[in-house]
Image: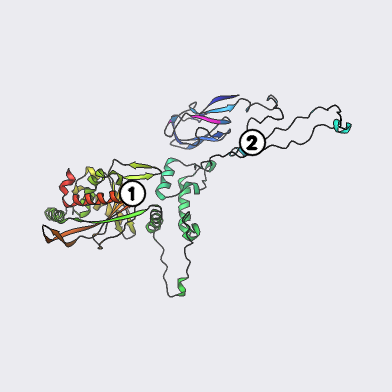
Amino acid sequence: MSKLVNVTLPDIGDFHDVEVVEVMVRPGDKVRVDDSLITIESDKASMEVPSTADGVIKELKVKVGDKVSEGSAIVVVEMDEGAGASEETAPKPPPTAFPARAPAQAQAQPRPALAPAAPAPALAPSPGRSDAAAAAPATAKVIPIQSAPQPSEPPIVRPHASPAVRKFARELGVDLTQIHGTGLSGRIFRSDVEQFVKAAMKTPRTEQHPAAPGLDLIAWPKVDFTRFGEIETRPLNRIRRLSKTNLARNWVMIPHVTQFDEADVTELEAFRNEINAKAPKNGVRVTLLAFVLKALVPALKEFPEFNSSLEGDHLILKKYFHFAFAADTPEGLLVPVIHDVDKKGVLEIAAETAALAARAREGKLRPADIQGGCITVSSLGGIGGTAFTPIINAPEVAVLGVSRVTHKPVWRDGAFVPRLMLPLSLSYDHRVIDGALAARFITYFGTLLADMRRALL
């Protein structure tokens, strides 16, 4: 026989309407007394709430974000009515009966065993049986019969950490399952993540990960370069140390394809120069980047797959337009984000990108300045080059590279005419975007730059 038991929130002191920040179990899970069920967090502390019953989770009464107080129902547990009975009052099972609950060590793969047989009374002599054998008590050891292991799902390891710590770890690309928390029951704090990152940065990459998992790569070659001549060892700065691991991950894990094209920006450049000529000396200088960012809005509306992120077998389509752009700084490449580009004019975009680039060079970017990007633009127009293959910035699915504009002869109306052409390099995640869609996107984007009036439609 079994019964359903409501497990409620115990007395947690002078706290009311405390938020549930983590649910550690799901229906079908087996739990024992003192197993953690949920984590609650107030403005002063966080704590794990244990189970007060043995059994199987039948129903969850709370979810992440709910507010709970003393007495609030947490889960419903189905427990065996005899499981909690004392040894004196619990009925003894017959020798061939299975116990009500397998030992704790066998929870992952139950192995039911026969219960020990109770001492049997002496048996009367029977033909072929000696008196000595008949008088001997039935004390023979009963060998447990083990059933064949039943297939079961591997337990899901869920690190104990608050949402703030989980978000912090995601931003740094840290796998929380690799961290041993210093808190109660292994809870991971922000300081644990920071220490993990510091240790990883001090450990040579070849020692930490000799080969990327699943890629069958040999270890990085270790060479004594001093054998061949004079060398200088220069440590990477903080920005480059963080960038190298992110770029390596993105390049290995995302199947990149790069589509190249050119956009005729002859009229756009004339319009841009006209704006800058009329602007006051202390006014904002409009760059081609501002027009590129503005033209991305209608392009992403027309092709929403480019404004998405891939999570497992689902595509997250975004309805907002926050665009990142690569900023060249003395410490390395930084990628600030300009938010709500669809709600801003070209002059406002130009002013904001200039301000963000300045903060990036001064090392004064705030966390909000580098979060929420939908797609990244990497512009090398001020430096040079004709084309390149930019690396996608996960979890985005595309990155647009822009090179220096050049005058080229273009065949128009039966003759070659000089036109100002802008090279475009579009790298995309081939798991989300195929070649035909990428070609349509970059062609459509080129028509917007050729005639910005289309971007207003």
Q: Is residue 397 left or right of residue 94?
A: left
Q: Residue 132, percent across and down?
A: 88, 33
The answer to whether one can see residue 204 in this image is: no
Q: Earlier in the sequence, mark 2 or mark 1?
A: 2
Q: Quadrant of residue 329?
A: bottom left
61 in the magenta segment: yes
What whole-number distance in Å separates the C-alpha atoms at marks 2 and 1?
49 Å
Of 49 and 33, the residue lying toward us: 33
30 vs 159: above or below:
above
Under circle 1, the secondary element is: loop
Point out the stretch of residues depicted in magenta. Answer: 56-66
Q: Residue at x 39, y 48 (%)?
A: 171
Left-right relation of 193 to 357: right
What number is the disc on residue 103? 2
Which residue: 44% across, 75% down? Answer: 228
Q: Position of residue 7 (x, y in %)?
A: 53, 28
Question: How would you rate the neighbour count of disc 1 (Cα within 10 Å): few for under 14, some for 14-19, many for 20 or more?
Answer: many
Q: Is residue 64 magenta?
A: yes
Which residue type does callout 1 highlight?
Answer: Val
Dividing the picture into quadrants, the one containing residue 342 is: top left
Colour scheme shown: rainbow
